[in-house]
Structures are given as structure tokens and as C-alpha cells.
């Protein structure tokens, strides 16, 4: 099962969490009033080739039109242009990373301007694999500066935060997430084009999923942190996604939680039934 310890300090109010397990439709009055449109991102990571990506795009394009949900796909850099040219136009395209500044003598890097030029609307920054893979080890400061630069170039940023297993077991979940958020808060003045993705590192690709209650608890704590350290308005308007072994079987229950505004999906986004996860927005909005 999922590790249970979140923090030793009373940063969240468990009594505010609601168990909504067996209801087919949930009214998210907080999100509705704040105008937080459900958001589902698919991070294809370093996977695929021209043939498999064409097959995936064809499968996604065959799906029904979607409403009340924003969908973004993030293919590997070599396939960004191809994906944007061929993917259905109601799905946006995102880079998986961008450089800390503009173009220049930065071999191997991709500038935010280049992503914009080929039609990308978003970029994923701060993903745990870029924070923690020993070959990369991006720091909070670098991620914050990348975030500012990407926003300045007109990209939206999917900002990933989350704790390692040992950090959760030590009761440091909120401390780590707040530290990662604070680094970005020092650099940017507007959060209008930022979406937060909470991804507990111990749940990414492991098959272990934070329970809906665990995820809601962290999302609620992050929203309270934003209210206290940025502004109540930013807290209400900013979408907080959950990521970490999200799949068609668990997405509906997670989507029913009041502070889960969507998902950043990894492995399951490489299959056409990613559309079933997109469809989970129906569990997260008021019935007509």
C-alpha cells in the first residue's frame, strides 16, 4: 500500500476531507466558483518512435470531442512538431523541458521560443525525473528560473512538485512541496499560466498510488500555502493536478476530490485509453 505519513505538524485539517467513493457525479463547488477547468496532461517521457506515435495520435484523434476539460500531450522533443501537425486541434502540445534562457551556445538544449515557434502552448518543468536522476539533478533554483523564462515567452508551465519516499516516511512531505513552491514564488509575479502537478515520487511508475485521501490532503495543504504566501485569489484559481500511476481504473475516484483539478499522466498516456482518463472530468464537474 501507499506510505501513510505526510507530516508531523498540523498543516492540514483532515476533517475537511470528504469521502466520495460511490457517487457517479460529484459537484465541485469550490472549483466551479473559482473557474478551475479540469486539466489532463499526458507526459510521454522518453518513449516511442515515429510509427508508435502515429498510432497513438490516430487513436487519440478518433476519440469523441471533449468539453469542460483541457487536454495537453507532451511528446519527446524530436516528435513535437510532428505531433502538433497531426494531433487533434482541441488537444494542446507541451514540451517536456526547456532551457533556463534564450537561444545561444547551449548545445543540446531547447529554448522556450523554439517550443512556441512550432505551436507548443505548454512546457513541463520540475518533473521529479529531472530533479532526481543523478545525471541531471536540477535544483529548485534552476527550475524556478526556467519557469519564469518560459512564462515570459508566453508558454504555460506545468510545474511539478513532490516528495521522495524517504521524505514522506520522515514526515517531510509538506516541507518539501512548500520549499519547491517557494523557490518559484520568488521568481514569478503572475501564476495565471501555471498549473501545479503534485507527484509523489514514490508513486511514479511504481504502481503505488497515493490514496484519494492522501492526494487531497496534500492538494488542500498546497492551496492553503498559496493563500498564505501568495494570495487567496491565486490559491482559488490555480489548478493542482495529481500524478503518480494514474490509470483508467483509479482516475474517477481521484477526480472526485475537491482540490484535485486533473492529472499529469505518465505511462497510461501512451495508450489510446488515455481518453478514459480525460473522460474522468465528468466525475469532477457538476451534473447539467
Image (tube, helix red, strand yellow):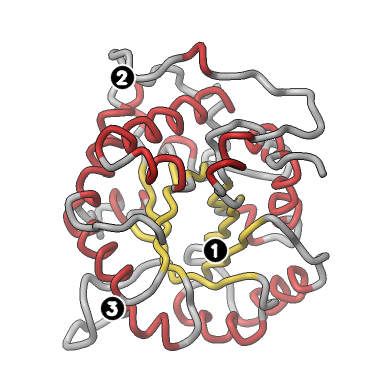
Q: Residues within 10 Å of mark 3 (few under 14, many from 20)?
A: some
- Dots 3, 2 in contact, CB < 8 A: no
- Residue at 69% x, 79% y: name it: 54
**Cα–Cα gap, marks 3 and 2:** 36 Å
Q: Earlier in the sequence, mark 1 or mark 3?
A: 1
Place of residue 82 in the rendered image (x, y in percent of width and height, measured from the top left):
58, 86
Place of residue 175 in the rendered image (x, y in percent of width and height, measured from the top left):
25, 29
Vertical placement of 224 versus 43: above or below?
above
- The N terminus lies in quadrant: top right
- Dots 2, 1 in contact, CB < 8 A: no
Asked whether 199 or 25 is in front, the reply is 25
Q: Secondary structure at mark 1?
A: loop
Asked whether 104 or 89 is in front, the reply is 89
Place of residue 109 in the rendered image (x, y in percent of width and height, measured from the top left):
28, 78
- Residue at 53% x, 44% y: name it: 34
Residue 145 sits in which quadrant? bottom left
**Cα–Cα gap, marks 2 and 1:** 31 Å
Q: Which residue is mark 3?
A: 109
Q: Which residue is mark 2?
A: 171
**Cα–Cα gap, marks 1 and 3:** 19 Å
- The C terminus lies in quadrant: top right
Residue 228 sits in which quadrant? top left
- Residue at 49% x, 63% y: name it: 45
Q: Secondary structure at mark 2?
A: loop
Asked whether 108 or 248 is in front, the reply is 248
Q: Residues within 10 Å of mark 2 (few under 14, many from 20)?
A: some
Q: Mark 2 or mark 1: which is in front?
A: 2
- Residue at 51% x, 45% y: name it: 241
Q: Is residue 184 left or right of residue 274?
A: left
Q: Which residue is mark 1?
A: 44
Q: Earlier in the sequence, mark 3 or mark 2?
A: 3
Q: Label for residue 103?
A: none
Amino acid at each position: 500500500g501507499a506510505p501513510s505519513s505526510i507530516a508531523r505538524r498540523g498543516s492540514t485539517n483532515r476533517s475537511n476531507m470528504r469521502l466520495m467513493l460511490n457517487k457517479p457525479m460529484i459537484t465541485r463547488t469550490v472549483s466551479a466558483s473559482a473557474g478551475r477547468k479540469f486539466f489532463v496532461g499526458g507526459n510521454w517521457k522518453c518513449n516511442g518512435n515515429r510509427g508508435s506515435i502515429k498510432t497513438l495520435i490516430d487513436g487519440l484523434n478518433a476519440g469523441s470531442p471533449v468539453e469542460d476539460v483541457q487536454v495537453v500531450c507532451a511528446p519527446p522533443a524530436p516528435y513535437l512538431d510532428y505531433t502538433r501537425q497531426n494531433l487533434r486541434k482541441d488537444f494542446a502540445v507541451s514540451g517536456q523541458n526547456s532551457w533556463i534562457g534564450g537561444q545561444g551556445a547551449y548545445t543540446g538544449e531547447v529554448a522556450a521560443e523554439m517550443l512556441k515557434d512550432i505551436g507548443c502552448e505548454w512546457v513541463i518543468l520540475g518533473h521529479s525525473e529531472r530533479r532526481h536522476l543523478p545525471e541531471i539533478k536540477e535544483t529548485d533554483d534552476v527550475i524556478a528560473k526556467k519557469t519564469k523564462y518560459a512564462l515570459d515567452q508566453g508558454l504555460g508551465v506545468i510545474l511539478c512538485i513532490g516528495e521522495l519516499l524517504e521524505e514522506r516516511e520522515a514526515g517531510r512531505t509538506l516541507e518539501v512541496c512548500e520549499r519547491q513552491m517557494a523557490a518559484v514564488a520568488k521568481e514569478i509575479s503572475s501564476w495565471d499560466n501555471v498549473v501545479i502537478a503534485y507527484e509523489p515520487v514514490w508513486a511514479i511508475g511504481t504502481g503505488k498510488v497515493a490514496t484519494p485521501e492522501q492526494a487531497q490532503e496534500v492538494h488542500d495543504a498546497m492551496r492553503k500555502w498559496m493563500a498564505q504566501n501568495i494570495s487567496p485569489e491565486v490559491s482559488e484559481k490555480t489548478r493542482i493536478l495529481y500524478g503518480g500511476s494514474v490509470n483508467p481504473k483509479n482516475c474517477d475516484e481521484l477526480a472526485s476530490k475537491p482540490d484535485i483539478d486533473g492529472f499529469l499522466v505518465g505511462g497510461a498516456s501512451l495508450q489510446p485509453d488515455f481518453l478514459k482518463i480525460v473522460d474522468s472530468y465528468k466525475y469532477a464537474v457538476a451534473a447539467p
